[in-house]
Image: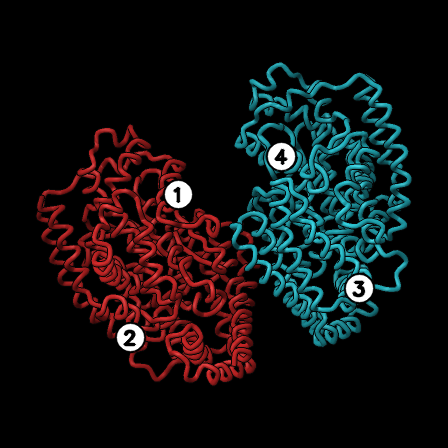
Chain colours: A cyan, B red
Amino acid sequence: MTEKLQQFKEALHEIADYLAVFALLEWDQQVNMPPAGAEGRSQVMSRIAEQAHNLSVSAETIRLLEEAEKAVAGIDPDSDDARLVKVSRKQLDRELKVPAAWVSDFAMTTATAHNVWEEAKANNDFSIFRPHLEKIVDMRKQYADFFKPYDHVYDPLLHFFEQGLQTKDVVEIFAALRPKQVELIKWISEQPQIKDDFLHGRFPEKDQWDFGVEVIKDFGYDWNRGRLDKAVHPFSTGFNLGDIRITTRVYENLATSSMFSCMHEAGHGLYTMGADPALDRTPLTFNYSMVLHESQSRLWENLVGRSKPFWKHYYPKFRSQFPTQLGNVDLAIFYKAVNKVEPSFIRVEADEATYNLHVMLRFEIELALIENRLQVKDLPDYWNAKFKEYFGITPPDNARGVLQDVHWSSGYIGYFPTYAIGNVVSVQLWESIRKDIPNLDEQIEKAEFKPLLGWLVEKVHRHGAKFECQELVQRVTGSKIDPQPYLQYIETKYTEIYGA
Amino acid sequence: MTEKLQQFKEALHEIADYLAVFALLEWDQQVNMPPAGAEGRSQVMSRIAEQAHNLSVSAETIRLLEEAEKAVAGIDPDSDDARLVKVSRKQLDRELKVPAAWVSDFAMTTATAHNVWEEAKANNDFSIFRPHLEKIVDMRKQYADFFKPYDHVYDPLLHFFEQGLQTKDVVEIFAALRPKQVELIKWISEQPQIKDDFLHGRFPEKDQWDFGVEVIKDFGYDWNRGRLDKAVHPFSTGFNLGDIRITTRVYENLATSSMFSCMHEAGHGLYTMGADPALDRTPLTFNYSMVLHESQSRLWENLVGRSKPFWKHYYPKFRSQFPTQLGNVDLAIFYKAVNKVEPSFIRVEADEATYNLHVMLRFEIELALIENRLQVKDLPDYWNAKFKEYFGITPPDNARGVLQDVHWSSGYIGYFPTYAIGNVVSVQLWESIRKDIPNLDEQIEKAEFKPLLGWLVEKVHRHGAKFECQELVQRVTGSKIDPQPYLQYIETKYTEIYGA
């Protein structure tokens, strides 16, 4: 029995090693690669993606999986081995539907598109990105077709990142969030506005960098297993449990951007770092629910990083780092400023009241593209019109509009909903944490994050990808994914901030 | 015909892509990888090395090579295609002798050893590195055995890096160099000594970095296709002709180390960058003569970078960057200081008169290890005794002795001779260059490197790895590899410097 399982795990290790190579190629592409390396890189990425796919669906892997299924029949279905086999089966059944040629072509297409997107964004030129995005959208439609019959054409795309939800679940959650968030934003817009001009000064890169490093070190980010670099769009990745990397970007004219990026990406990194080492180099450390992943990143970024106790501890340090800019700004003012609610162009900089609307906008657009109701050539205008509808303002250019996010260039159509649902889950978890750690605020005020991280490791991280999002949320919080706590949280938070 | 060749090239591209992945894994390991990533990285490197090997010796590759051999029969034997097939055949015949399991084990062993070596060097602790080096030496002996019968047990190791030479050629060249160099060094030691204390001050990293970048940019290093990073031991690598990277290390208490490293590694980078794009992703851009490679790096480092015309141009800039340290040092004094000859511990910092002796020491030691005359456990003492014999001084610790070089940790036993023979070749090329570019000195004095680089591209770089070292030297200079021009060059140079 054990031997069969061991053989299966070795096959999984081989696949995981190729996925690790792919992740390194991608990390390096976004962090280091000189421009002229793009073409060669696309070829290599395409080749490695195809090899990983071929190994995943090989007759030998299937045979080993079948043996493994027999080996785990009857054991505790929640055990690592049983879950590993279950997750692997689900993954195999998905991968079997996708031709190797598509995998290879898609890797080549997105690797190429990524560099074009960087250039398009830098030069505010959608036209050069357009043909690449057209191909990506077409390929994503093909991908969905491989999964026919489906309930919804968007389901296979969503499942690429989040297997635990259906498109109709997303629609339902968003339908609950949207009117309440719009109502809250409207109420806020009628209150006296918060001053935050002092956040837009000059904040030298090195000081911002050092502050971010200090904070995530306090969170528990393990530098022996990780590193922080700069990238055009912040992201996190990992090659094995000993090498988990995050990136940020620094705007010297904006005090808070890099700091919150660091916390967000460290949240992803901490999640992966917390997995049980026994799960390393298997689908249980690769095949994550992105809703759960985003619940972790958004938890550290917002529930910790935009909280009053957090700034009670860190603001004196932060202020002393930038005495010219912040010398006259006291804690109460600063706390309000980093929580200022206003319609803004950039999703990753958005406050907690408007953030989900940025996601809904993208979800709507992705549905329109995939359902053939929108063509890529019309996307910038469509984006701007929708943006006006959602936020009452029009992006001044495509770089701050349709080109702002890296996701589509990487083929990540279907990803965005996980951010908003991650927000929802983060607050559900937070309520459970508060019950178990009643003095959480006092701990955060002292930068004592060990109990919090310990809770997350115990309840969430150590399981790796054993549980899908609904199941894990149910196990930990006792209820399914529910937007009400999030709505309650933002209402309470902003009523205090804006009503005071 | 063309179709058969094309199919063969596609097979070569696949192999090249895996070698590119391996090179990236190695680059990242030395430049970026967090410490805990070592174990996972070894596994991945081992897997990719084995895959590249398996593809190289697959029945399909052999079949395609045989077809390609038929296709090129009768065409110009110097054409790219004929040479590609010839080089591929030689490589295949070599690779067929080596079992895949050895390749995989060796990659795992050296990837692991590299990180241990870094630690051993940092802590000046040979004992932790010893078992790894023992395994490497044992595996290198096994490797040599795969090639029985051989003229010399060291031949297969040398051929790993330099197929154009036999061990007896190395012995012969070193026998010609050694007595003359020893004699020159003795004469120099009897002259009034050169003052260079001003080079050992405080030279901030950023200033050193910027200067190195400026110089190699002037040389023609293409930042669109390359980048410069920090590593424990400077090296160069490349993944395809669009992505060729170099590294350096900076000692803030030593003015010249990083600068000459930059020039040396840029020399390697320029060589690779100069290859005809048609050769990309084939053995003709992977399977280089390391003698030729080192002839390029040493040419830029020494014949350009330690020359009087070079410093006529750059010294005013360099001096103005470090006014406190160099304000009272004029050009003549500075030029002598960067050419000071003295026994020293570190090979890569050595002057041109003593450098080859550092190489001969290593060659002697490698022979002793491979011929079973020396055991790894006795290596530090052996090193120190030999060092005393060669240089009259004893290394103060292993970090500045047997642990100084990265090569053995990477399994590079057989590499060192290429540095000294590269020096020899660099001067032979330099004499030809002087004939073709009579005003070379004036050009260098104006930092006009285009004619020099153009010559090198035309005569050397564009050919990639089409020619082995003896053949290329013969074609370009009209004679075979000959140590006399090098001896003449250092005698003239140092007589002027020390006799003046």
Pointer 3 chain: A
Q: Which mark, by number, is residue A258?
A: 4
Asked if both marks, 3 and 1, belong to the same chain, the answer given is no
Q: Which residue is mark 2?
A: B166
Q: Residue at x 38, y 49 (%)?
A: B220
Pointer 1 chain: B
Task: Point out the frontmost of discs 3 and 2.
Answer: 2
Q: How far is disc 3 from disc 2 in space, using C-alphas?
A: 57 Å
Q: Which residue is mark 3?
A: A90
Q: Which residue is mark 1?
A: B213
Indicate the amino acid at tag 1: Val
Q: Element type at marker 2?
A: loop
Indicate the amino acid at tag 3: Lys
| Residue B368 point in image, percent of width and height | 28, 70
Q: Element type at marker 3?
A: helix
Please say if A22 is above or below A343: below
Asked if both marks, 4 and 1, belong to the same chain, the answer given is no
